[in-house]
Amino acid sequence: MKLITRNTDYAIRALCYIAKNEKKVLSVKGLVKESKITKPFLRKILQHLNKKGFLKSTRGKGGGFVLMRKPGLIRVREVIEAFQGKIQLSEHVFIKRLCPHIKVCKLKKALDGIEKNAIRVLNSITIKDLIKNLAR
Amino acid sequence: MKLITRNTDYAIRALCYIAKNEKKVLSVKGLVKESKITKPFLRKILQHLNKKGFLKSTRGKGGGFVLMRKPGLIRVREVIEAFQGKIQLSEHVFIKRLCPHIKVCKLKKALDGIEKNAIRVLNSITIKDLIKNLAR
DNA sequence: TTAAATGATACCATATTGGTATCATTTGTC
DNA sequence: GACAAATGATACCAATATGGTATCATTTAA
């Protein structure tokens, strides 16, 4: 029951690193040194970030990735959703049979509240916020 | 990324039903009619609830399950943790290499906050709260 | 003795996540 | 044009968690 999976975590890290080197075109080869994961795996993650509109890629020799938007406009919530789908903590099955007042079910309400809070918080944090604290 | 899995959901439902019939010893056979799931699966869930101290079982003919505690003392958080382990939304890998100020990492803080909120809310809801709203 | 109940446990199915491998395509440079 | 360096696309495999079934052992009331 993790809010952030490995994929997402690596993606956020990669975005942070790319953000710190804005303007430069960074290849997987360059990034892999920083990230402690294998090249093919990082490639997959960057390709996905590209497809989802976080990065812009250039192919061929000297190619690589750059950010599509300013770091301050990339929200952690968006990155999570790009890799894990919409944040939906509140699904629960509790069917009508035993929970006929589904609209007022206290558990459903609680889960909804937790979800809303999570989304609000994660939406308020951007890549810019994360790199501010990074050394160097 | 669900806060409550099927297992847990069924367990909560079963506890609600048993709570509504406090004092009676309820067998799986009786419960299965109410719950729309198969008998073996429900048995497994009730056995687990028994092991975890939510129910007390009596074996042999006429046996079944009763609540070990008053419905107002069974917290949803506890049921979740009995089936899914401790609520830990905040694990993330973000290693020191790229996140050297791990103690002040903004993302870590945010995840911790979300987790705390979730635990607080789920801890405040008991089976008693859930059956209050139930019809019949 | 028998039937009705739970205890324990092993097993299988499915979905998700994590990760690897491979071939195709693009592009700068000699 | 040939080559090397890069990404695009895609197929595949492994590990884990979850959902669910099956079976045999044990207990107990009648």
Image (tube, coloured by chain):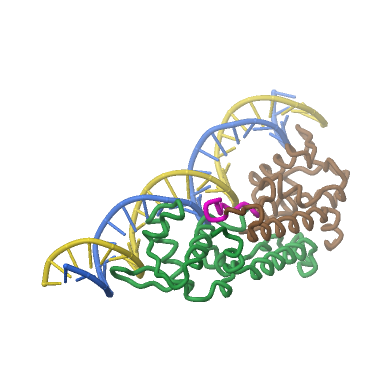
Chain colours: A green, B brown, C blue, D yellow
Residue at the image point whose x is 58% and y is 73% from the top: A72
Residue at the image point whose x is 64% and y is 46% from the top: B41
Q: Quadrant of residue B55?
A: top right
Q: Is residue C11 above or below residue A24?
A: above
The residue closer to the viewer here, B23 or B122, is B122
Q: Is residue B70 above or below residue A121?
A: above
Residue D22 appears left or right of B126: left
Give percent across and percent down for residue B42: 68, 46
Give percent across and percent down for residue B56: 80, 37
The residue closer to the viewer here, A85 or B76, is A85
Residue B102 appears left or right of C29: right
Give percent across and percent down for residue B1: 61, 59
Residue at the image point whose x is 88% and y is 46% from the top: B70
Q: Quadrant of residue B23?
A: top right
Residue B92 falls inside the magenta stretch = yes
In the image, the segment drawn in magenta is B90-99
Residue at the image point whose x is 79% and y is 42% from the top: B54
Residue B136 falls inside the magenta stretch = no
The residue closer to the viewer here, A56 or B78, is A56
Give percent across and percent down for residue A28: 38, 61
Dominant SS in magenta: loop
Q: Is residue A32 above or below residue A116?
A: above
The residue closer to the viewer here, A65 or C11, is A65
Q: Quadrant of the C terminus of chain B?
A: bottom right
